[in-house]
Image (spheres, coloured by chain):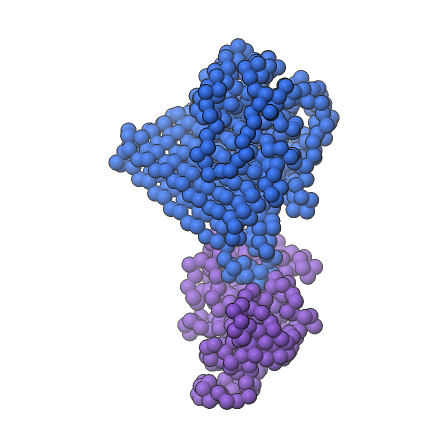
Amino acid sequence: MLEISNLHARLADGREILRGIELSVNAGEVHAIMGPNGSGKSTLAAVLTGREGYEVSEGTVTYLGHDLLTMPADERARQGLFLAFQYPVEIPGVNNLYFLRTAMNAQRRYRGEPELDAGQFLRAVRAKLKLLDVGEDLLQRAVNVGFSGGEKKRNEIFQMAMLEPRLAILDETDSGLDIDALKAVARGVNEQRAPNRAIVMITHYQRLLGYVEPDRVHVLQDGRIVESGDKNLAVELEQRGYGLLGDVA
Amino acid sequence: MTASTDTLQTVRSLSQEGYKYGFVTDIEAEEAPPGLSEDTVRFISAKKEEPNWLLEWRLAAFAAWRKMAQPNWAKLHLAPIDYQAATYYSAPKKSTGPKSLDEVDPELLRTYEKLGIPLREREALAGVAVDAVFDSISVATTFKEELAKLGIVFCSMGEAVREHPELVRRYLGTVVPQNDNFFAALNSAVFSDGSFAYVPPGVRCPMELSTYFRINAAKSGQFERTLLIADVGSYVSYLEGCTAPQRDENQLHAAVVELIAHQGAEIKYSTVQNWYPGDAEGRGGIYNFVTKRGACRGARAKISWTQVETGSAITWKYPSCVLEGDHSVGEFYSIAITNNRQQADTGTKMIHIGKDTRSTIVAKGISAGRGQNTYRGLVRVQPRAEGAHNNTQCDSLLIGERCGAHTVPYIEVRNPSARVEHEATTSKISEDQLFYCRQRGLSAEDAVSLIVNGFCREVLKELPMEFAVEAQKLLAVSLEGSVG
């Protein structure tokens, strides 16, 4: 589903952050990308989702057979690419549910599917609410306005559950969560596992990976993936830390 | 579907077709010779067969105007206006006052159809009476019979002068006197027509009253005069929505609106204005210089102004409330957009005179392109206005790097028991917000529209339902091309 080949990317000021990423993600798989601060995790998420301010200097990214890097951000989203933000932004005055329904219908229109009317939409919403332990009151508020950190993260996973993406990138979704929020988020993510869907979790810690077992774990350091393995790699890393990888590859 | 919805629905097509009202109706207009003199005023009055008292009133206004100079204190750049070059009267020749739609010039009806006002279907529509103004003469007035059963008068100003002269004479100029300001004086001298409404005591007007404007003949200014009176304990909601064709010369629109709310009465006045704003370089748009004022004459009277101003090259207006009655309430909700090279200097004046009066101001300004948007508001509490309370919130949203937002609040409090609160914010649509929306599948344009609508929500929810939906689309259309 996703093929990243020799991806080099730099910031607007010229600093190179990604230095030749190689990654292959197939449908149905759950991957974890771990790494210390400054390794390029957020840059990778930004480049994949089409955020402005980054320049790809080399390499290719193929998504569902398309050249991802030439697609504008909203087109990537409509093709089923979803990002659970590390720091979800507030949008005052815009009702959370209204926002979600607008997004869903924009994507449905693009795919030639019929749009959801208010009734259908609300039924779908209620079904997912219980799963994620998201209160209905959260939905009636403006997008992320006044949400606690945990509520923001749960709102991201709730949106993912409603939008049913093909490829979901979760950017440090577990940071700042207490145990209950973490479990709710994990429930949401696990519920989304499907043969035609891939999930990539970007994280520092092993915590979330205890609840959402990855098929593959990759370690990102200095802009490159320096090691890959199965879920046990994550446990190992937790014990030995990132430091020992300094001279590998 | 209501008349207002029909008209505003045509705005939707703007996004595909550009400003599609760029056409001129080919009807022989009977015009006054260009220029403005006492003779012009007499010509207009004679054409309308007005009684002498009104002619004298106009002449007094003209005399006052002659002594005034055009004000230049606003934060606006405008080319000098040659008042002698314009034509001050223009009426379609065939129309001497139709008794039914069958008598209306078919060419005029076609014009209205283009503008999205299917007069022919008016009777089948639910709820909104329309007083359609074509240039300087009212052509058709509908639903009069229904309203008449309740004792409600809703007709053109010209007709009101003929049929209800005592009402007009009692109230005209009592809220905005002839010498109030330069443009009001001009309007008072040469006003063409407009709307008149009177709601009798205790009556709640069952439908929203509405009016349409269209400025047509080149160099003819539009000088509408509107007078709405809500008698004791009555209620009326009035919608004003305008369109205008594409022209090369700037067109001056100097209207005057006077509202009078008696004891316990309420007037809700809503405006959606999307006149031709000029091209991307700012050429050729409408100058919208309007004097609007409401007087809460009796206790517990209430007047609300809600406006969505997206058009015109220059918007210069301060819908105001004079809170004379004890416990009277004034409200002002505004969205003003300036895109490309538009300019706006707009706001309100709330004058607290009675006891325990209250005013609310919510002004949302959105600047994009090279637009310059100024909020200018006055809150004045007179010495004997015990217990006055004002709450003002004035927010600016900047889109892009080259626009401007300015705020000029005047707070004049001469009673120590007053409570006046003023809050202001200035913000930009952040890249983060835009990216968040786009990452969910919304196009850049839809993202801006969504965020802007969120920003304007407090004002949008004050609009009558039909207007609110169309206003949201209008906001999106007005901001096209402002991002990316």
What is the number of callouts on the image? 0
Q: Point out the image quarter for the N terminus of chain A.
A: bottom right
Residue depicted at 59% across the width and 80% down the height:
A20
In percent of width and height, residue A209 lies at 50, 79
Q: Is residue A194 in view from this perspective?
A: no
Name the residue at 49% across, 71% down. Answer: A173
Q: Which chain is purple?
A: A
- The colour applied to the residues of chain B in this rendering is blue
Q: Left or right? Give the position of B27 relative to B356.
A: right
The picture places residue B135, in percent across and down from the top left corner, at 63, 26
Q: Position of residue A64 (x, y in %)?
A: 68, 72
Q: Position of residue B128 (x, y in %)?
A: 59, 31
Taking the view exactly as shown, the residue that stands out farthest to the left is B416
Residue A153 to residue B159: above or below: below
Residue beneath the point at 60% across and 64% down = A73
Quadrant assignment, res B413: top left
* The C terminus of chain A - image quarter: bottom right
Query: Of B360 and A194, which appears nearest the observer?
Result: B360
Q: Residue at x 62, y 30 (%)?
A: B214
